[in-house]
Image (tube, rainbow, N blue to C red):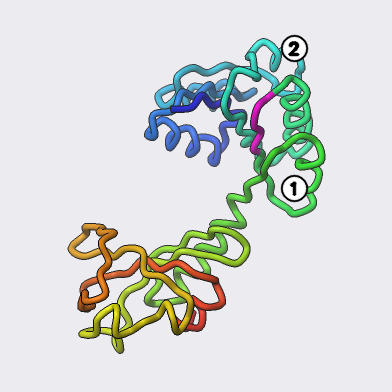
Amino acid sequence: MKTVLLIGLGRFGLHAAQQLSRMGHEVMAVDINEERVNQALPFVTAAQIGDSTNEGFLRSLGVDNYDLCLVAIGKDFQSSLETTSLLKELGARQVVSRSEQDVQSKFLLRNGANEVVYPEKQMAKWTAIRYTSNHILDYIELDDTHSIFEVSVPKAWIGLTIGKLDIRRKFGINIIAYRKDGKLSVTVLPDMVLTYDMSLMVVGEYKALHKCFHI
C-alpha cells in the first residue's frame, strides 16, 4: 500500500482515484472545485478543496510524506506546471504529472516531474491498435520498442503445439500466458496444443509482433 496525493479531479483524476482505491492505496484528493471533491469522496481516504498553486496550501498537506504525488490537472497547463514545480520544491519524493502534448512534457520534466503520462495519447494508440486488428484483444506498451499483446490464436496455428510453432526462434517473441474459458494461466508448455477458443499473451519487440501477427 502507498500513500498518494492526487491533485486534479477531472475525468482522469476521478478515474485514477477510483482505481487507486480499488488497489488499496491511501489517497488524499485535492481540487479547487468543491463539486469535484465531493464526487471523489466515496473513493478516497481524505479530500480537500484548495488551490494547488498556492505554496502555503500545498505545504499544509505535508507533500514530503506521500510516496507519490500525481498531478492530474488537465486543461490548465499553467496550474499543472506551477503545481509540479512547487511539489518538487517542497520535497515531494516522486511527482508524476499529466501531459497532453510533447512540449508540455518537456516543461514538466524540467520543472520537477519525475515522469509524465499521456492519457489521451496512450488511449488513442491503444484504440487504434485494438480496433484495426481483428485478432488483437488487448495491448500494453512496455517501452518505445516492446509491447505485450493479447491475441486470438491465428487460424494457421490451431492444432499445432507451442514447440512446433517455435515463434521465439523465428520472431524473438515469447508466449508468457494464455486465456481459456475466461481463465488466465501462466503455465505455457512446449507440448500445449493451441485451440480456437484460446487467446495468447505474447511479448516482444513491436516490429516483431507486427510481422508475426500482421498488425
Q: Looking at this view, is 103 or 161 the one in front?
A: 161
Disc 1: which residue: 105
Within 10 Å of disc 2 (Cα), the crowding (few <14, some 14-19, many 20+) is few
Seen in the image, is 135 located left or right of residue 207? left
Seen in the image, is 28 located left or right of residue 175? right
Name the residue at 39% across, 34% down: 23
Task: Say whether residue 112 is visible.
Answer: yes
Place of residue 171 in the rendered image (x, y in percent of width and height, measured from the top left)? 47, 81
Tell me the magenta residue range: 92-96
Name the residue at 43% across, 27% down: 1
Place of residue 208 in the rendered image (x, y in percent of width and height, measured from the top left)? 52, 78
Label whose residue precedes the other's in the sequence (1 or 2): 2
Give the distance between the C-alpha atoms of the residues marked 1 and 2, in whole angstroms: 26 Å
Place of residue 152 in the rendered image (x, y in percent of width and height, measured from the top left)? 32, 74
The three-letter amino acid code for the residue at tag 2 is Gly
Name the residue at 68% across, 46% down: 99
| Magenta run includes residue 67 | no
Place of residue 95 in the rendered image (x, y in percent of width and height, measured from the top left)? 66, 33
Disc 2: which residue: 56
| Magenta run includes residue 94 | yes
